[in-house]
Image (cartoon, grey):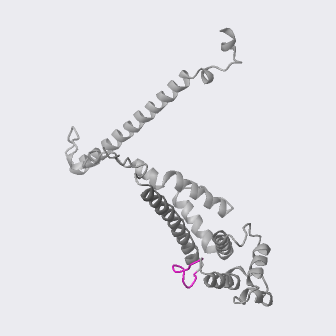
Amino acid sequence: MPARYTGSYLPCPVLNFRYKLHAKYFLIFKILYNMAALFSRKLCALKYHQPHNFNFSDENELRNLVVWLEDQKIRHYKIEDRAGLRNTASPEWLKAYEKYTRDLGCPYQVSEKAAVIDWLLGYAVRLDFGDEVNDPDFKAGVTSLAMMLQIPPYQDHLEQLKAICILVKEKLSKEILEKKKPANPNEVIPIDKTELGFDTGDYIINEAAKILRLLHIKDLRELQSNINHAIVAVQELIANPKTAIPRDSKFARRR
């Protein structure tokens, strides 16, 4: 009886080798694609003239990008000291490039092309947008956003921006908002189908009373959920003798 394919290997050694080879190439392609997407976002932020078509594997494109970054964004060298970088056709360009990365403090070797380019792009982005965070309009925007989110004012707008980021991450992230959605769409009860249980004689007051009743029910549900969580927490605490009674307490010594 022929062996059945279980999904963990291929029955034919040749096919198995090809499968592993294709999987390896797919992984490499995925890494390169993600790297290209990362470069593209940073190049767009820097307003590079061809952000979506940059190929860091192309030596000419890489050299032209390095020159552009130094001339337009980084400006670490004086203009007269950039000749070595600008002469991209020179056989000595790699030496000039290696010296340039060392002078900037890049932690990678020039042989690590992708890592160096990513570092240079990140460095250029920090320099390019570093002045904007101290712009009065930017400060005013942070203050306005903090007021909208009811975050207390702070003298350092960057620290206030960190607080905004923490709040957005903890309260307004996609995952948190998904959790707040009702698990069952039927839990959303239309107000026109809600029975008040009594009649005030006024339609507007009846509708307002329905809203108050639904809000009250919602609060009771949240209270019940909190109580359930508290009960579970207490039960876990009591079930753990290490946290229930400290060893050095007088209750422990009495045992």
In the rendered image, residue 207 lying in the magenta stretch gets the answer: no
- Residue 181's place in the image compared with 78, above or below, is above
Farthest top residue? 254
User: Is residue 44 visible from the viewing direction of this image?
Assistant: yes
Q: Tell me where residue 49 appears, x and y as whole percent.
A: 56, 85
Q: Tell me where residue 80 appears, x and y as whole percent.
A: 80, 90
| Front residue (pair 227, 52) | 52
Quadrant in which residue 128 is drawn: bottom right
The secondary structure that dominates the magenta segment is loop
Quadrant in which residue 50 is drawn: bottom right
Q: Is residue 135 left or right of residue 51?
A: right
Q: Tell me where residue 137 appears, x and y as whole percent.
A: 60, 74
| Front residue (pair 14, 32) | 14
The stretch of residues the image draws in magenta is: 47-56
Looking at the rendered structure, the number of numbered marks drawn on it comes to 0
- Residue 20's place in the image compared with 210, above or below, is below
In the rendered image, residue 55 lying in the magenta stretch gets the answer: yes
| Front residue (pair 1, 82) | 1
Query: Which residue is found at the position 41% from the left and 38% from the top?
Result: 222
Query: Which residue is found at the position 79% from the left and 86% from the top?
Result: 78
Q: Tell me where residue 197 appears, x and y as whole percent.
A: 21, 37
Query: Which residue is found at the position 39% from the left and 40% from the top?
Result: 219
Quadrant in which residue 157 is drawn: bottom right
| Front residue (pair 29, 172) | 29
Q: Quadrant of the C terminus?
A: top right
Q: Is residue 73 left or right of residue 229?
A: right
- Residue 217's place in the image compared with 247, above or below, is below
User: Is residue 76 visible from the viewing direction of this image?
Assistant: no
